[in-house]
Image (spheres, rainbow, N blue to C red):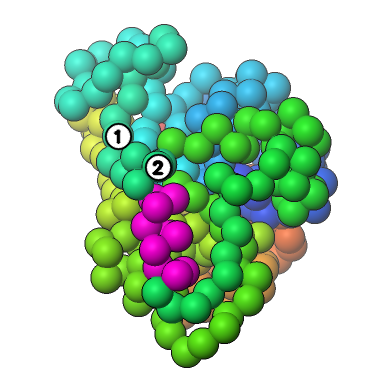
């Protein structure tokens, strides 16, 4: 059937939207580990946040950060050398994202031109990020270590104008997650997933991929996997309209993730 890989969003998917707990997903995570099925995190979170979570969960596989800004692969994970990668912190990083400072300035210009009042992570203190995202102070500190993606909230609109259009007119992209809007360069989770799946194909042959996500920024991920699964959320209906072949998980967050992954892994034979 092929080499199996699970690619997953984090917030609102593998992690509970409110508490960030993943306890309910332990049975499926244990099953993936027992059957040597990689679990790939593809998230809007920073590298610092994901590295912390990987240590906590014992995950040793590649990961995708900041909405496809970069793919990070542990050194010697694949037998062949990776193209266009740079070695950093014991891993090889393939970057597509735009430098953070450029995104911050592009958002400022777009808001000014369209009469929007926005507040991005670059303007927020650690305490404010913690409050907005329901994070601990340490988690918020890691969340502010942005490289390729500026999360922001819209506070007010003072005149007619499209913030999205103003962002796109500068050559950048707007997407939304479970809590925040994001401005990024011309990168998304889908491009990073395609690159990673090709690396698995080169190493192991045919690949069968399971993908899970809950928000608009997960659509490119879901479009590039064999079995896409949408988690219940306020964005679920729109995501399913855009990815009509996607299944809908029957429960929210890690509980639904656990049930969906166990069901799909059980129906697919070992590679």
Q: Is residue 32 left or right of residue 253?
A: left
76 is higher (above) or lower (below) than 134:
above
Residue drawn where x is 27% and y is 64% of the image = 170
93 is higher (above) or lower (below) than 167:
above
Q: Which residues are magenta?
A: 103-112
The residue under label 2 is 101
> What secondary structure is the magenta-colored segment mainly?
helix
Residue 78: horizontal and vertical position, in percent? Answer: 30, 18
Q: Quadrant of the N terminus?
A: top left
Q: Quadrant of the C terminus?
A: top left
Q: Secondary structure at mark 1?
A: strand
Residue drawn where x is 74% and y is 53% of the image = 132
Task: Tell me if residue 233 can be seen.
Answer: yes
The residue under label 1 is 95
16 is higher (above) or lower (below) than 215:
above
Alpha carbon separation for disc pair 2 and 1: 16 Å
Residue 202: horizontal and vertical position, in percent? Answer: 21, 29
Mark 2 crowd level (few <14, some 14–19, many ≥20, 10 Å Cα): some
Q: Is residue 228 magenta?
A: no
Foreground of the two, 145 or 125: 125
């Amino acid at each position: 059937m092929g080499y199996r890989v699970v690619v997953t969003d984090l917030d609102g998917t593998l992690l509970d939207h409110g508490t960030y707990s993943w306890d309910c997903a332990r049975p499926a995570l244990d099953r993936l580990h027992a059957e040597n099925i990689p679990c790939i995190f593809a998230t809007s979170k920073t590298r610092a946040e994901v590295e912390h979570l990987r240590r906590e969960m014992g995950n040793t596989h590649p990961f995708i950060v900041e909405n496809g800004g970069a793919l990070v692969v542990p050194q010697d994970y694949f037998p062949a050398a990776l193209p266009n990668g740079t070695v950093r912190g014991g891993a090889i990083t393939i970057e597509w994202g735009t430098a953070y400072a450029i995104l911050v300035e592009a958002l400022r210009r777009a808001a000014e031109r369209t009469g929007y009042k926005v507040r991005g992570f670059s303007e927020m203190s650690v305490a404010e990020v913690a409050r907005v995202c329901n994070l601990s102070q340490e988690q918020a500190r890691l969340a502010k270590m942005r490289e390729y993606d500026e999360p922001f909230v819209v506070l007010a609109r003072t005149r007619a104008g499209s913030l999205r259009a103003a962002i796109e007119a500068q050559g950048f992209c707007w997407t939304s997650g479970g809590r925040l809007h994001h401005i990024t360069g011309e990168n998304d989770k889908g491009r990073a997933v395609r690159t990673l799946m090709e690396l698995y194909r080169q190493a192991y042959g045919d690949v069968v991929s399971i993908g899970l996500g809950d928000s608009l920024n997960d659509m490119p991920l879901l479009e590039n996997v064999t079995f896409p699964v949408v988690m219940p959320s306020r964005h679920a209906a729109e995501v399913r309209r855009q990815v009509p072949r996607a299944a809908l998980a029957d429960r929210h967050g890690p509980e639904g993730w656990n049930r969906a992954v166990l069901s799909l892994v059980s129906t697919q034979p070992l590679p």
